[in-house]
Structures are given as structure tokens and as C-alpha cells.
Amino acid sequence: MKFHKTLFLLALLCLSVTSCHNKKNTSNNEVNPVVAPPDFDVDSAYAYVKAQTDFGPRTLGSDAHAACRDYLLKQLASFCDTAYLQSFTAHTYDGHNWQADNIIASFSPQNPERVVLAAHWDARPFADHDPNPANRDKAIDGANDGASGVGVLLEVARQLQKNRPDVGVDIVLFDAEDYGPKEGVEAPSGEWWGLGSQYWAKNPHQSGYRARYGILLDMVGAPNACFYQEQFSMRDAQPVVANVWATAYEIGYGSYFINKPGGVITDDHYYVNKFSSVRMIDIIHYDAVSGTGFPPVWHTLDDNIQHIDKNTLGVVGRTLLQVIKKEK
């Protein structure tokens, strides 16, 4: 994903960041909930994140990428009514063509009333923001940037299998999100991020596919994460943002889901909104003081399992399940 530096939004966030976790504790509920949060096993979600990183960096064309793809497909097939691959060729900014696979799984695929949940499962092939220049050509584990959102969605799927939703739910794991231009490299003109979401948006897994809305997860596993309201999400799907943030508040997570504007981020949701009829938002950790707009481990070798917090995974997973529970 790419962060757009906008002075106006940065000024707003500099004012607002002090409100995030000023008196943070590690309990599951930061505020007394209005309603009880749904069941969500944080140990299970964490295990799903770790399983992905145990394969090694899931970069296009690697053995780790192929092995993780097969693992994710098998897991989703065990929970959902259908699960399959949407294969495509990812043409990257450096002139390479890669075999890539979006992973798609569905509950109640015949139900016309649908919600789509998404994350990207690939890892960045170069740690171009690592503080050590010697590491900047090395691939990253992508524990937070990719695997955290996927881990949450796997546990969400496991819970939905036990408590079937009233609406159809599609889980889409996008490939080739994070092969955007390397920092400092001049790339040819084009849309080089989010290649899997671009493909899915232009070629949905069902002809004429429609959904009430979509929710993308990205970087949802860091300790003390703050989820501000991303600005492309607000532009394209403000009612969805309002619903998700209000739901998080009612189950006790208002200190994670901050009711203030966030950054302007080109992520998979941007391409879904641009190229399809689905209105999708991005739940993504924004860090107003890191200098990049993202957590300090972003696109570094430190984006590994040691920096994943179970409580944060639980906050996001329970919020998603409560949002779906309210759909009739």
C-alpha cells in the first residue's frame, strides 16, 4: 500500500493522535461495552498469523508463496461452503510477469445479500524502509502487513461456521498487493500496487457480483494499534465507516477505532472502489508520528511475528463479527 502525504490531514492527525491509548491497558475491552462482544479466539487467530510467517516471506514466485497459498485454501475450504483460486498474471513495475492467485471463499453463495471481507496475503519482496541499508533488498515476513488481516479472517471464518450469518459472506484474499515500486526507484507510469484487487474488481468471481459493502483489513496486529478513518474509505463509503466505527464503540473498542480522520492510503480497497460497484473501506493502522504514516516496522525485517499482539487481533475480529451479526 502507498501513503499519500497530505498536509491538511497530517495537521488534523497531529492534533488527534494524543487521544489514542493515552491510558492504554491490555484488557480486551478498553471501554465498558454496550453489548457483549462476539466469541473470537485470539490464540487461534495468532496461530494463523504465525503459520503464514513460518513459511517464510510469501513473495511472488517463491516456494513459500506456493505453500502458503495451499495452506490458506485448505483452511478456508474447511470452514466455508466454497473455496477456490482466482488465478491471474501479475505484471509488476519492474517488467516481470508472475503467477498470482486470489483466494476466494464463501458462506451461502446463493444468498443475494452479501458482505465481502478482504485482506492481502502476499509479502513485500524488499524491506525498502529498513533502517539498515544492507537489508533493503531482502524480503519481509509481512506478519502485520498482510498476515495479520488474513489471520483475523481465518478465525472469523471459523466462527461463522459455528454461528452462520443471515447474509452471504465472501472472504477474498488478494495476491500481489505489495509489489509496488521500491523506494527510490522511478517506475513507469501505471497502477503498480494492489494487482490482485485490481484483477478481482475488473473480473469478479461471479458475473454481476454485488455486495452491500466490503471491509478490507491491513496491518491489524500491532500492539496498541490505532485505526483512524482512512480518507478514501470516507470518500467512497462513509456510511460503512460510520457503521463499523460505531459497532466497535458499542462493544468496547472506542480507544482502538478512533472517530477522527486518518491518512490517504492507496490500498486494495481503493481499486475495488475504483473498478467495481462494491463500496469497500480499509481498517488499517495509522501512525501519525512514525514518518511513514504506518507502524515503525512497516516494510522492514522487523515486521515479524514478535511484533504481533493477540489483543489487537481480537479487537478487529470481534468488531467484524459484530458488524456481520447485525446484518439481516
Image: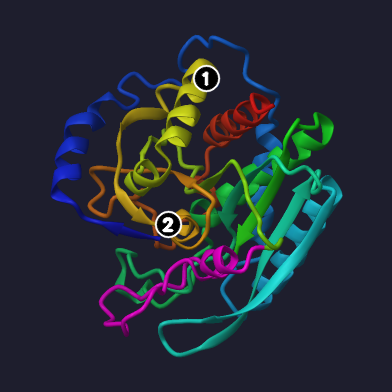
What amino acid is labelled 1 in the image?
Ser
Which is closer to the viewer, label 1 or label 2? 2
Image quarter in which the C terminus is found: top right
**Residue 161 percent coordinates (x, y):** 82, 37
The residue wearing badge 2 is: 270
The residue closer to the viewer here, 138 or 95, is: 95
Query: Tag 2's secondary structure?
Result: helix
**Residue 244 percent coordinates (x, y):** 49, 30
Q: Is residue 276 left or right of residue 8?
A: right
The residue closer to the viewer here, 301 or 8, is: 8
At a point 59% along the width and 65% down the height, the residue shown is: 200
The residue wearing badge 1 is: 27
Can residue 53 be seen? Answer: no
Magenta-colored segment: predominant secondary structure: loop
At a point 62% along the width and 19% down the height, the residue shown is: 37
Magenta part of the chain: 175-204
